[in-house]
């Protein structure tokens, strides 16, 4: 098929591009390279260096005539959303509306990447798609707004756009400077023989899902409908994550502990049974994904 991937030069987006190219699809990338990198992109993908809010976006869609749009371009940093909520809303809400309108011109289906943890709030048990959404940051709220616009377009225009809510994604190409990059931070520091730090007691839990599995889920979602959680359904403490990272790196290193960070969730885990049932999708074990990620980190 012919696809556009917004944010396709970024961490997750570039893996979606690779998965599409591996199937023989025609892939176009819309990315302003604010956090994305040209070197993440395979030569077979066509890059349109463009912001999703740019007035020339519809012309790109008219020229490419995509059948599917994977919409990953976003302002994805929680701290930035708190400091600059208007900017966050401009990118994540207005930008998403512009993508939806550009896609409507060509009849393309949109697969939208949203967030799990930032939407559901505290999750003592795996959150299903029906759990009340209680965002704790402007970022979570802007992603929720994006979802609602998407579903409104489905009702208003008869489109069949799909929402995916991602757990904590990790894997090759993740930047240590971006939100949720604890795996990248641990592995980078373990590689370099530097001190690793856990904020709080380390018993806070997260649902860690490999970026390759996320890419597979997004491609599978093209044939689905509605809203899908994309995670493992397994809670892993940050202490256990550090132990597994050290194991993958082949070192024996204990982390230092620092004061907990204000606003951090205590527990976040997603129930992905719907994606497993309707899309035939599942995620690999964390230990396997960390071994693959370490193999990449060790070469950088």
Image: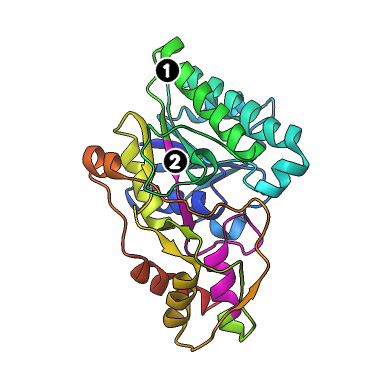
The residue nearer to you, when weighing 172 against 77, is 77
Above or below, 254 against 4 in this view is below
Is residue 172 in the magenta section? Answer: yes
Residue drawn at (62%, 56%) of the image: 37
Is residue 22 in the magenta section? Answer: no
Residue drawn at (45%, 54%) of the image: 15
For the residues labelled 2 and 1, the Cα–Cα distance comes to 18 Å
Q: Position of residue 185 (x, y in %)?
A: 59, 70
Whether residue 178 is visible to the viewer of this picture, yes or no, is yes
The residue nearer to you, when weighing 57 against 271, is 271
Give the labeled residue for mark 1. 154
Q: Pick out the residue farthest to the right.
A: 83
| Label 1 residue SS | helix
Q: Position of residue 14 (x, y in %)?
A: 50, 52
Quarter of the rendering occupied by the C terminus: bottom right
Residue drawn at (42%, 63%) of the image: 236
Give the labeled residue for mark 2. 165
Q: Quadrant of residue 287?
A: bottom left
Q: Quadrant of residue 151?
A: top left
The residue nearer to you, when weighing 69 against 249, is 249
| Label 2 residue SS | strand
Q: Quadrant of residue 248?
A: bottom left
Q: Which residues are magenta?
A: 164-189
Label 1: how many residues lie within 10 Å, few (<14), some (14-19) or many (20+)? Answer: some
């Amino acid at each position: 098929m012919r696809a556009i991937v917004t944010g396709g030069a970024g961490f997750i987006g570039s893996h979606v591009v690779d998965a599409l190219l591996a199937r023989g699809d025609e892939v176009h990338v819309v990315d302003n390279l604010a956090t994305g990198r040209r070197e993440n992109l395979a030569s077979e993908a066509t890059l349109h260096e463009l912001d999703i809010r740019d007035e020339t976006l519809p012309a790109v869609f008219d020229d490419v005539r995509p059948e599917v749009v994977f919409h990953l371009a976003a302002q994805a940093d929680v701290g930035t959303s708190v400091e600059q909520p208007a900017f966050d809303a401009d990118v994540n809400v207005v930008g998403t509306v512009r993508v939806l309108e550009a896609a409507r011109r060509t009849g393309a289906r949109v697969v939208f990447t949203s967030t799990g943890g930032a939407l559901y709030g505290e999750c003592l048990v795996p959150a299903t798609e029906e759990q009340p959404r209680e965002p704790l940051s402007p970022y979570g709220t802007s992603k929720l707004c994006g979802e609602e616009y998407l579903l409104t377009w489905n009702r208003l225009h008869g489109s069949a756009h799909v929402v995916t809510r991602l757990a904590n994604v990790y894997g090759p190409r993740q930047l240590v400077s971006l939100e949720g990059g604890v795996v990248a931070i641990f592995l980078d520091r373990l590689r370099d023989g530097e001190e690793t730090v856990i904020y709080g007691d380390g018993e806070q839990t997260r649902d860690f899902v490999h970026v390759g599995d996320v890419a597979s889920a997004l491609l599978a979602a093209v044939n689905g409908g509605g809203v899908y959680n994309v995670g493992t359904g397994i809670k892993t403490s940050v202490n256990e994550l550090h132990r597994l990272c050290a194991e993958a790196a082949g070192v024996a290193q204990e982390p230092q502990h620092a004061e907990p960070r204000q606003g951090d969730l205590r527990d976040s885990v997603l129930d992905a049974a719907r994606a497993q049932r309707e899309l035939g999708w599942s995620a690999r074990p964390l230990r396997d994904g960390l071994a693959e990620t370490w193999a990449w980190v060790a070469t950088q």
